[in-house]
Image (tube, rainbow, N blue to C red):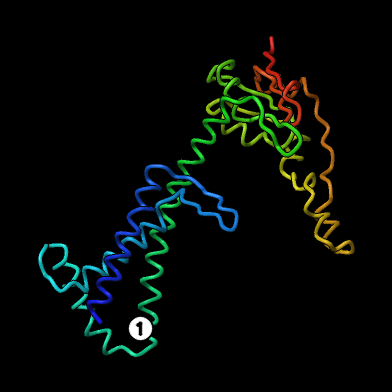
Amino acid sequence: MRRIVNRLAGGATFLLLAPVVLVLVYPHRWDLGFARISLHSPGNPAMCLAAAFWIWRATAVSHRGRLTRAIQGVTQQIRPYWKRWDWRRRLMFAAMVAGVASTGSWAINYLVELREDREELAELSTRPSVEKGSARETCLQYFARQCRRAIPAHGRILYRGDDWGMPFAYEVYPRRVFMLPDDMAFAAACWNGHYFPRQRGKADDPLDDYWMRRTPKVDCDPAEFVSGRGITHVVTFDRKDPAKCKIEAIR
């Protein structure tokens, strides 16, 4: 039985080497029609490869190699406890091992997702607009890149536009970004402009009044707001119409 397990684990080790190497060299998603194979992160294949390699070396008849002896030593230390444990403790130990493996896989996948997000944002910063369904939308990263070039680092910006003021402020940091009270109130309650409260299928939901309520209008003179905060530039961003996006310097 030990030889059979050893041979199966050895074969699985060599078979799992292929997807691990492939995802490191050429991460991609293949659509086969009846199934979709996604190899864009080495997390899951690497965890499976590590498990198969451990079983392969732990069940090896030969004791040559420091790594093999170390794995077999750890396995032999766990074996007496495994025999004494009842099914509850064995289940808890298996759950702990599975949790460690899933956490390691999640950590690897998370690093890959961060890299992919960074590459996507870098690509968006070079494109004025992107297609969203049948329409085109302005790329905030591209517009923010133009603002960083046109506005000095000590500039103070008044943002006008839809509810993307806070992401815009992050993109143009360390430049200070301000919004008029009405614009800020709309950004803080931006779910009012979303469709999901009306798509829940509960027309008589008593919480509709809460979700769909509007904040009261705040009287504010834009000229006083600009002068009082030393604003040097006014930026207008329109997600649906790139032609309306503009940067204006205040003389």
Image quarter for residue 11? Answer: bottom left
Could you tell me which secondary element the residue under label 1 belongs to?
helix
Residue 220 percent location from the top left of the image: 80, 29
Horizontal and vertical percent position of residue 4:
26, 77
Few, some or many C-alpha atoms within 10 Å of disc 1 (few <14, some 14-19, many ≥20)? some
Q: Residue furthest right?
A: 204
- From this viewpoint, which residue is outermost toward the front? 33
- Single out the residue that lies furthest toward the left: 64
Please give the name of the residue rendered at 57% of the width and 34% of the height, measured from the top-left corner.
Answer: 170
Residue where numbered disc 1 is placed: 90
The answer to whether residue 88 is above or below residue 148 is below
Q: Is residue 18 left or right of residue 131?
A: left
The residue at the point 48 percent across, 46 percent down is 113
Relative placement, left or right, of 241 versus 98 is: right
Residue 96 at x, y = what percent?
38, 73
Along the line of sight, the residue nearer the viewer: 41 or 241 = 41
**Residue 246 horizontal side relative to residue 31, left or right:** right
